[in-house]
Image: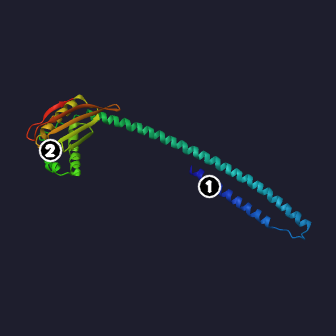
Amino acid sequence: MIIINWICIGLIIVVLLVWLYRMVINVRLQLIKPPRDASATFQRKLDYVRQIQQTKHISALLFVTFCLAVGVLLTTYSLFQVQDQLYAVNEQNNVLKDDVQVMKKEQKKLVNKLPVKEYPKEGIGLEEYSWDDLFSDDSREKQYAMESDLSNKLSPYFGLPTTLIVLDIPTQTLNIALAGDLTSEDNRQQIKKNIQAFATEAEGVSNLTQITFQLNVRDGEKQKQDYSCTFSRENGEDKFLMIQED
């Protein structure tokens, strides 16, 4: 490919040199003005030289045309080569994308086969958060930091890649949404146990009076609700009771 490009450049240079040379000769001939008293012999010689140069002009034009034609052919061939290479690269990219998709699916299957961790008996440290400050200070940044940190802590015990937590301060409600691919029945049961264990630990947070859970799973390309439940209590001293389960 590089050699073809250099050949094309060389042909262009040759064409320019030939054209420039013939133009110089043509201009010089045009500048020759025979004197009025020039002999007929001089005029015939001048006409003869002009005819010869005119013939050479035609030959040069044919040579330039040939060089340009060769350059166009080489450029066209080079473009076809580039197109073939691009097609091959696109095919490789498509194959790699398919391989990546297969790997992702296999990875998801492997993750779904892994057992969900049992919720720790000592809890995950819910009471360590500054709940009083969160409910008294209208700071969205502090609330977001708590929600993000709590999501990361709960993810291993819910077995799904997405754990979204939103604290609704006016209603004193902690909303937890779980989303991911279909998991095994054993993991489903463990997730339900962990939800109950989380609600039990949350009883130590007097600011909360309601907790909602929603489990969404992906079945093919669709998302559907697989499980939901709601825990509630009258005040911060009572225990959480499950008031709804689907």
Q: Nearer the viewer, mark 2 or mark 1?
A: 2
Residue 139's x, y, as percent? 21, 52
Q: On residue 73, which mark appears?
A: none
Front in this rendered view, residue 33 or 136: 136
Q: On residue 126, which mark appears?
A: 2
Q: Residue shown at 23%/48% (left/top)?
A: 144
Front in this rendered view, residue 90 or 193: 193
Q: Residue shown at 34%/35% (left/top)?
A: 105
- The colour scheme used to paint the residues is rainbow
Residue 235's x, y, as percent? 10, 40
Instruction: Kindly report the distance in space between the C-alpha atoms of the residues bearing marks 2 and 1.
Output: 73 Å
- The 10 Å Cα crowd at callout 1, few under 14, some 14 to 19, many 20 or more, is few
Q: Can residue 77 be seen in this view?
A: yes
Residue 38's x, y, as percent? 89, 69
Quarter of the picture containing the C terminus is top left
Residue under pointer 1: 9
Identify which amino acid the numbered label 2 is placed on: Leu
Does 31 appear above or below 156? below
Does 3 appear above or below 84? below
Q: Can residue 125 be seen in this view?
A: no
SS class of the residue under badge 1?
helix
Q: Which callout, 2 or 1, points at the residue further toward the start of the chain?
A: 1
Q: Residue shown at 15%/48% (left/top)?
A: 131
Residue 157's x, y, as percent? 20, 38
Q: Decide if residue 30 is on the left or right side of residue 18.
A: right
